Image (tube, rainbow, N blue to C red):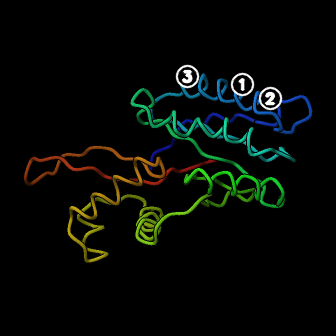
């Protein structure tokens, strides 16, 4: 796994009292995050640090989380977003979970212990595939197909969907024997 440049944005510092309560604050925060994402080098991760946020409203979070839709734009190819949460702050985490679920999103996050987690819901097939990528460190469609006894096209679709959700990254590699090309998929590593 390669090292990645990680840029941390502490979201509590963007409001006067550390809370995320107004939709307008969410809109301004989105613009800050968009600017930071634009500056990030390819392969970099923008860490949205919510650990110090005590309270948030759904209307403010909806505006902030638009950055995940923005990040899917071709201009941000190879740039990733990751939430940092304090799971002990149950009120905030509950509000975030509800907002993410209502929008049908799936977001990568790390908790206060640095443990990887997801906010939102994935199908069982995608969860299993994501866990295998995280466990093995890197995989190809052939490996996923073999592991789950599915056609390579189905394995490719699973990996492509996880990649489009920006839950994993990929690089293109040549295949030595055939001279062709394949994608190698990797998790989003975070090193503090």
The numbered mark, 1 or 2, whose residue comes first in the sequence reads: 2
Instruction: Give the residue at x 26% y 61%.
Output: 141
At 62% from the left and 57% from the top, the residue drawn is: 101
Residue closest to the eye, 31 or 175: 31
Q: Are marks 1 and 2 in contact (CB under 8 Å)?
A: yes
Give the residue number, with chain letter if any, for mark 3: 39
Q: Which mark is residue 50?
A: none
Looking at the image, residue 28 lies above or below residue 155: above
Residue indicated by mark 1: 28
Residue on which disc 2 sits:
14
Q: Earlier in the sequence, mark 3 or mark 2?
A: 2
The image shows residue 192 at horizontal and vertical percentages of: 66, 47
Which of the 4 image quadrants contains residue 15? top right
Q: Position of residue 25 (x, y in %)?
A: 77, 29
Q: Nearer the viewer, mark 3 or mark 2?
A: 2
Residue 122 relative to residue 82: left or right: left
Label 3: how many residues lie within 10 Å, few (<14), some (14-19) or many (20+)? Answer: some
Q: Residues within 10 Å of mark 1 (few under 14, many from 20)?
A: some
Along the viewing direction, whichever of 103 and 43 lies nearer the viewer = 103
The answer to which image quadrant residue 162 occupies is bottom left
> What is the C-alpha distance between the residues marked 3 and 1?
17 Å
């Amino acid at each position: 796994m390669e090292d990645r440049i990680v840029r941390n944005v502490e979201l509590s510092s963007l409001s006067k009292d550390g809370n995320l309560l107004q939709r307008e604050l969410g809109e301004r925060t989105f613009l800050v995050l968009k600017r930071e994402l634009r500056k990030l080098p390819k392969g970099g991760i923008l860490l949205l640090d919510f650990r110090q946020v005590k309270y948030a409203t759904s209307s403010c979070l909806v505006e902030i989380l638009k950055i995940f839709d923005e990040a899917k734009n071709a201009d941000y190819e190879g740039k990733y977003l990751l939430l940092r949460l304090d799971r002990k702050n149950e009120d905030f985490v509950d509000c975030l979970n509800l907002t993410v679920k209502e929008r049908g999103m799936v977001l990568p996050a790390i908790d206060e212990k640095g443990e990887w987690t997801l906010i939102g819901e994935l199908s069982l097939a995608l969860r299993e595939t994501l866990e295998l990528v995280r466990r093995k460190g890197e995989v190809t469609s052939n490996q996923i197909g073999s592991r789950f006894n599915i056609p390579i096209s189905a394995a490719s679709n699973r990996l492509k969907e996880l990649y489009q959700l920006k839950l994993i990254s990929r690089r293109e590699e040549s295949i030595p024997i055939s001279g062709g090309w394949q994608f190698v998929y990797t998790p989003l590593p975070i090193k503090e």
